[in-house]
Amino acid sequence: MHPAPIEDPFHAAFRGNFTGVLSWEDLDAFWNVVRDNAAAGWYLYAIGEPPPTAPATAEQVNIFLGEIDVLLRKEHEEDYCGIVYTDSKTEPSMIKIFDPNNLGVQCGFSDNPPLPGWVLSRLPPVTLHDHAHRPENRKRWWRKLWD
C-alpha cells in the first residue's frame, strides 16, 4: 500500500475553508485589516503569471489593494461584493479574489469552478493551472502595477 501523496502547504490552504466578503462596506473594513498587516509577508499571485518567489513589500501590497478595489467596483456591477474570499476576516493568511469577468456559474455547483484571478497568500504560492484564457487586458493591468 502506498502512502497518500503529501500535499504542499499552499495547496492545502488553498483548498481550505473560506468565507465570502459579501458587502462593499465589509470589503472596505477587510482591506483595512490587510493594510494594517501589509508588511506581514504577503505573496501577490496573478493566476496565469509565474508565482512570485518573494513576498511583496508593504508598499506593493497597498498599491495592489488600491488598484484591485478600483477594478472590482468598476467591473463587478452589483450592489454587493461576493467575489473576495478569505480564510479569516480578522487574521487572514490567504485571500482569493475572483475576476468579475470570469465568474463561471453564478449560482449552484460546478464540477469545474473557475480559479480566482488573484491570490494573496502568506505562504509561498505554487503554480495553479488554469485552463481558462486570461484576457490580455488583465495581463497588461497586472504588469502595469509593477512597471
Image (tube, rainbow, N blue to C red):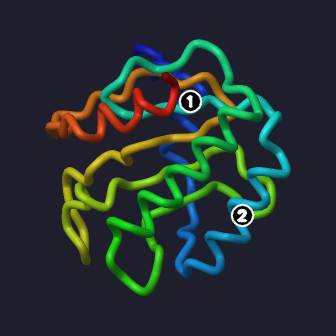
- 85 or 79, nearer to the observer: 79
Secondary structure category for the residue under label 1: helix
Spot occupied by residue 34 in the image (x, y as percentages of width and height): 74, 52
Pick whichever of labels 1 and 2 is earlier in the sequence.
1
Q: Pointer 1: residues within 10 angstroms few (<14), some, or many (20+)?
A: some
Spot occupied by residue 118 in the image (x, y as percentages of width and height): 44, 42
Marks 1/2: CA–CA distance? 19 Å
Q: Are marks 1 and 2 in contact (CB under 8 Å)?
A: no
Q: Quadrant of the N terminus?
A: top left
Find disc 2 in the rendering and name its residue: 89
The residue lying at 25 percent from left, 34 percent from top is 130
The residue lying at 39 percent from left, 55 percent from top is 98
43 on left or right of 88: left
The residue lying at 28 percent from left, 28 percent from top is 129
Q: Amino acid at mark 2?
A: Lys
* Image depth: mark 1 or mark 2 in front: 2
Spot occupied by residue 60 in the image (x, y as percentages of width and height): 66, 33
Secondary structure category for the residue under label 2: loop
The residue lying at 24 percent from left, 40 percent from top is 137
Q: Amino acid at mark 1?
A: Phe
For residue 41, which numbered disc appears in the image?
Answer: none
Residue 115: image quadrant is top left
Find disc 1 in the rendering and name its residue: 10
